[in-house]
Amino acid sequence: MTITTTPAPRAGRREWIGLTVLMLPLLLVSMDVSVLYFAVPFISAELRPTATEQLWIFDIYGFVLAGLLITMGALGDRIGRRRLLLIGATAFGAASLLAAYADSTATLIAARAVLGVGGATLMPSTLALVRNMFHDAKQRGTAIGIWTATLTGGIAIGPVLSGILLEHFWWGSIFLINIPAMLMLLLLTPLLVPEFRNPATGRFDLISAALSLGALLPVIYGIKEMARDGLSPVRVLAIVGGLLVGALFLHRQRTRAYPMVDLTLFRRRGFAGSLAVNLLAMFAIVGFAIFTTQHLQLVLGLSPLRAALWSLVPSLAVGGVAPAAAALAQRVERAYLIGAGFGIAVVGFVVLTRVTPETPLWLLLVGASVYAGGLVMVMSLVTDLVLGAAPPEQAGVASALTESSSELGGALGMAILGSVGAAVYRREIVDGLPAGLPADTTAAAQETLGGALAVARGLPAELADAVRHAAGVAFTDGLHLAAYAAMAVMLLGAVTALVALRGVRPADSTALAVEPTGPADTSLSSVSR
């Protein structure tokens, strides 16, 4: 047969409007990660969950989402990415309605689990469809920059929107806001977004799907639980068990004719390096978020809503970074830009090492804005590299692997940076507490910053001020060491980018016109490479 290539087609108005439609589910899925922050007291008052049930209300969404990303990415490649997007939107809308009117803790946990299933279909589908709609590398870079900005913006907007709604409506309203957007998605997607599926994928492998879930879920669960409550045999066993199941999953992918994840993707130049760089970026941006949030609320004493509003400042400040990085990448090699992004993040963390309980709010916001800007630049560029390295027919799995690396990086960041900060806090506060406190009071103050402030509320004014000051100083000392640890990871990320990604560019997609010279399946006469 004779194969001729034609230049990659450029996206027009329809594709850009379609991109706007695809941002709706992405925004809502990212918001649902954080939308419960202010609703917990209201839910607790009405449904009266136990402490364990309350944790599951929070965590089940993220666990299910992370565990099913690879499965749903592969499923979208087989049944059609637009079709999976519509199925996921329907499930997400129905689960939102169920969560809004849940009359028991079990119902709310079940609804949050279904929301996680829906979210796992929506995230890789939106990114894979961006890959299929934008074949020109320059346009695709801009589209992925918008995708990245929407994802990070949704996480920041979630608590603010939750706080505003809870001031005027009942707690279920934080879920009902999903429904109009999902209805709009169901109406507009068939008109504006083309369908794509890979016809050469074989039957869906249920065993591989179960193995991927059994690998990711225990690992992320173990890491997150260690970040919250420390090391324990059960959590270590969960991680080890997940890694063993992951080894079985990889073995199955190597030996099947039609694997769920084609491991030859990792031999493509820039693919594995981009995933590693993405993991390191998410390590810092998620792992350090708890420090800025706690400093705003517990050290500076801001109300939850005021703290959430101020936390929007870094998101607003870096809102145009991702599209700007995509434009700059047309002139400067991406490896250098990614290294520069990590360098900018280092500058932000240096600023944060100067934060003390007495420093003004603006210094914290400047540091957070600078490191967030650098890392958003990194994330948008590496996402483009991952999708550019993968063939369009495997964009669903490539998208899922990108988001799985993000989930794993965020979990590791919370565990490691959180542990560093907690260890410094417990060590430093011992020397700062006033003498003569009862043993149980001292022990409670040594556990967490929140515990110390709770203790201070029950003490005379002079002692209370001393405890608050000691706790604030110990916390910021922990913040400083966590910032130094994040700097080390950022330097590792810069080196990784310069070594693994130098010279790597996402190529334009080209249309292949295939002219069969003998009997052939004419349905394959035009394919994308």
Image (cartoon, rainbow, N blue to C red):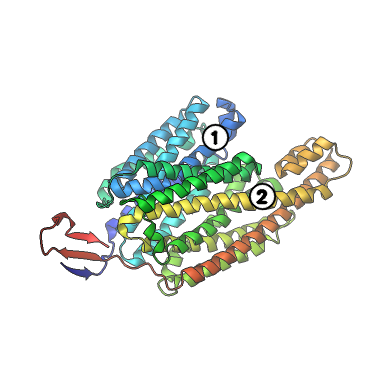
Residue at 58% across, 26% down = 48
**In terms of depth relative to the viewer, which is nearer, 356 or 403?**
403
Image-quadrant location for residue 92: top left
Q: Residue under label 1, please give it.
A: 56
Q: How many residues crowd mark 2 within 10 Å: few (<14), some (14–19), many (20+)?
A: many
Residue at 14% across, 55% down = 521
| 511 relative to 58, above or below | below
- Find the distance from the CA under tag 2 to the CA under tag 1: 22 Å
- Type of the residue with mark 2: Ser
- Type of the residue with mark 1: Trp
Residue at 34% across, 68% down = 507
Image side of residue 62 versus residue 88, left or right: right
Marking on residue 463: none
Residue 183: x, y in percent? 34, 40
Q: Residue under label 2, please give it.
A: 419
**Quadrant including the C terminus:** bottom left
Residue 341: x, y in percent? 53, 66
Residue 158: x, y in percent? 51, 45
**In terms of depth relative to the viewer, which is nearer, 91 or 277?**
277
Q: Is residue 310 visible?
A: no
